[in-house]
Amino acid sequence: MSTPEAASSLLALAQTDVASPLPTESLHAALSQPPFVHVPGTFNTRDLGLVPGSPVRPGLVYRSGGFLTTPLSPEGRAALADGLGVRTMFDLRSVREHEQRPDPEVDGVRGVWVRPGEVDAVVGLEDFVEGEGEKGYVKMYLDVLKVYAGSVKAVLEAVRDGRGEEGVLFHCTAGRDRTGVVAGLLLSLAGASAETIALDFILSRIGTEPAREQLLAFALKGSMAEDMHAPGFHNLCNLRISCWEAFVKAAESEYGGFEGYVTGTLGFSETDVAKIKANLVLQN
């Protein structure tokens, strides 16, 4: 149901402060409608083509949080491979995350993990103290583009070479930050509006709610915060469109935007980019 009303309803719920748990009834209603898709053993799983306003073809590109159960249940494996038609699954996590909890094996689905840069994306709480944490998000997400460049390139190659026929899923731990950067890049290449891309970004506020406690613990450990009252921690855990907009502006300044990053840093040709765009929206 990709309507303006659906977008408005999802946006309103997604803008709920992270300090307040989402109402159970509203959460269940949101997770049972597009762009969310149900795969047992996963959370924050969405179809980029079903985000209201998205130009991406539904059933082609999926984003997700990490796997809650390993191995996946038969129902989870069937939903992923048969239900969604995923043929390649990309793990956007760090060396430690990947080694401690490898992705489950799913028949018919190729798993891909590209070893990231030696230094993981930096999270310093001091950068998240001012405003809504814009400075911290800009730094963190620009680091994602550098540290996980190999993974981003692999996802784009799969879209380019798949001819719009093979489902692709990519995930990190929360399916929020690293995954959000890659999703925003793909939506941008497909020609999505700034509003649509920002909506997809902030929908992780809803999608991560089922794993709320686990992810708060993950954030505490990763940021080395003493507790949830540490200065900057609230902004780190919250999702605000202002932070995404600040990152987009910074990427424009540093790379000439997402397309500039894809060609200038990742080395794709203009022909490659044209194929990626065409496959995303099936204009070929």
Image (tube, rainbow, N blue to C red):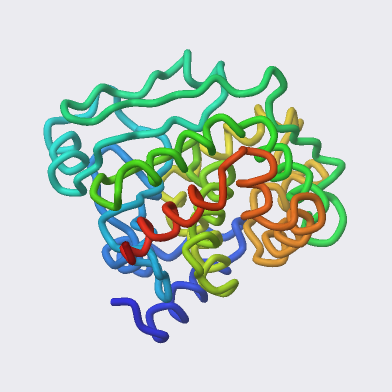
In the rendered image, residue 244, in percent from the top left (x then y), is placed at 67, 60
User: In this rendering, is residue 66 above or below 127?
Assistant: above
Q: In this view, does 166 lie to the left or right of 118?
A: left
- Name the image quarter holding residue 105: top left
| Identity of the residue drawn at 50% across and 70% down | 192
User: In this rendering, is residue 111 above or below 59?
Assistant: above
In the rendered image, residue 68, in percent from the top left (x then y), is placed at 35, 33
| Identity of the residue drawn at 47% across and 34% down | 154
Q: Nearer the viewer, residue 262 or 93?
A: 262
| Identity of the residue drawn at 44% across and 30% down | 91
User: In this rendering, is residue 110 above or below 214?
Assistant: above
- Name the image quarter holding residue 241: bottom right
Q: Nearer the viewer, residue 51 or 36?
A: 51
Q: In this view, does 260 lie to the left or right of 250?
A: left
Which quarter of the rendering shows the N terminus? bottom left
Which quarter of the rendering shows the C terminus? bottom left
- Name the image quarter holding residue 26: bottom left
Q: Which of 204 and 228 is in front in this view?
A: 204
| Identity of the residue drawn at 33% across and 43% down | 168
Q: Is residue 214 left or right of residue 18?
A: left
In the rendered image, residue 140, in percent from the top left (x then y), is placed at 73, 42
In the rendered image, residue 186, in percent from the top left (x then y), is placed at 49, 54
User: In this rendering, is residue 17 above or below 91?
Assistant: below
Q: Furthest residue to the bottom?
A: 5
Please count the marks in the image: 0
